[in-house]
Every structure is written in structure tokens, then in C-alpha cells.
Image: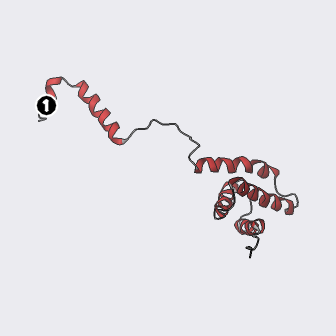
Amino acid sequence: MSQPQVDYNAELYAQFKELISKEGLTPLNISRICVSLMQATERHTELKGHEKKELILNVVKRYADEDSGNFSSVFIDMLPDLIDTFVAVDKHRLVIANKEAKGCCIDICNIFSKSLDKQPHNSVNKPVV
């Protein structure tokens, strides 16, 4: 007996409509909505990453078609790259600030050794009065 076919589009579309029911889909919330949709697709472990991405794009395109022209095509154009960027951040593939790896102990040791270099050698072991 086979398992019933899951209609991922209908399920995700219902969640999408619930997300945008209060404030709509705007430039201010598009990234938050996108992340919410990505999180919703994560529970479907049987889907591959590109299938989840396509599912999200289909849901948003369906909304755009039903919105009778009030929906900006800019949202649809930017979504694939936005999804790819969020995935890269999630997988730690995107580095925004390339900083030297330093621990606080290393920093403290460097500061301490520089301060010792400035002192005369004979004063290092003398007690401070």
C-alpha cells in the first residue's frame, strides 16, 4: 500500500497566506517571510534542497498570479538569490567579516608581553610597591 501523495504546494501556500495575512508581503518583511518558508520546508526531509527552493518559488509565484498585478516582480526576481544567500549563511559558507582568529587568552598574552618588553629587564621580578 503506497503512502498518500503530499501536496507540498498547497500546504506551503496555506502557511504562506497565514504569514502574510496580517501585514502583507512588503520589502520590509520579504526576507523574514522567505526564512519562514525555508524553515517550513525543512521538515520535508524527503525533498532535496533545489526542490525546496523550487517549492518556495512556486508558492510566491502563485501568490503573484492571484494578486492581480499588485505584486512586484522584483520580489520574484530577487527570491532565488535571497534563498541561496540564506542557505550559504546557514551552512557557514558566507563570511561577512574576515577576522583573525584570536582568543581572549592570546590577546591578553600579547598585551602582557608587549608591556614586559617596555620595562627594564631587572624590574620584571621586583615587587610593585
Q: Nearer the viewer, residue 75 or 14?
A: 14
In-image side of 82 versus 110 (left or right): right
Which residue is the extreme one toward the front? Answer: 1
Residue positioned 76% across, 70% down in the render: 5
* Numbered circles on residues, count: 1
The image shows residue 24 at horizontal and vertical percentages of 74, 63
Circle 1 packing at 10 Å, graded few (<14), some (14-19), many (20+), is: few
Residue positioned 37% across, 41% down in the render: 103
The image shows residue 31 at horizontal and vertical percentages of 67, 54
Quarter of the image that includes the N terminus: bottom right
Which residue is the extreme one toward the bottom? Answer: 1
Q: Is residue 110 above or below residue 65?
A: above
The image shows residue 78 at horizontal and vertical percentages of 75, 48
Q: Is residue 59 above or below residue 111?
A: below
The residue to which callout 1 is attached is 125
Residue positioned 27% across, 33% down in the render: 112
> Dot 1: what SS?
loop
Q: Is residue 85 above or below residue 17?
A: above
The image shows residue 50 at horizontal and vertical percentages of 72, 53
Q: Nearer the viewer, residue 47 or 123?
A: 47
Amino acid type, mark 1: Asn
In-image side of 116 versus 128 (left or right): right
In-image side of 116 versus 39 (left or right): left
In-image side of 97 versus 62 (left or right): left
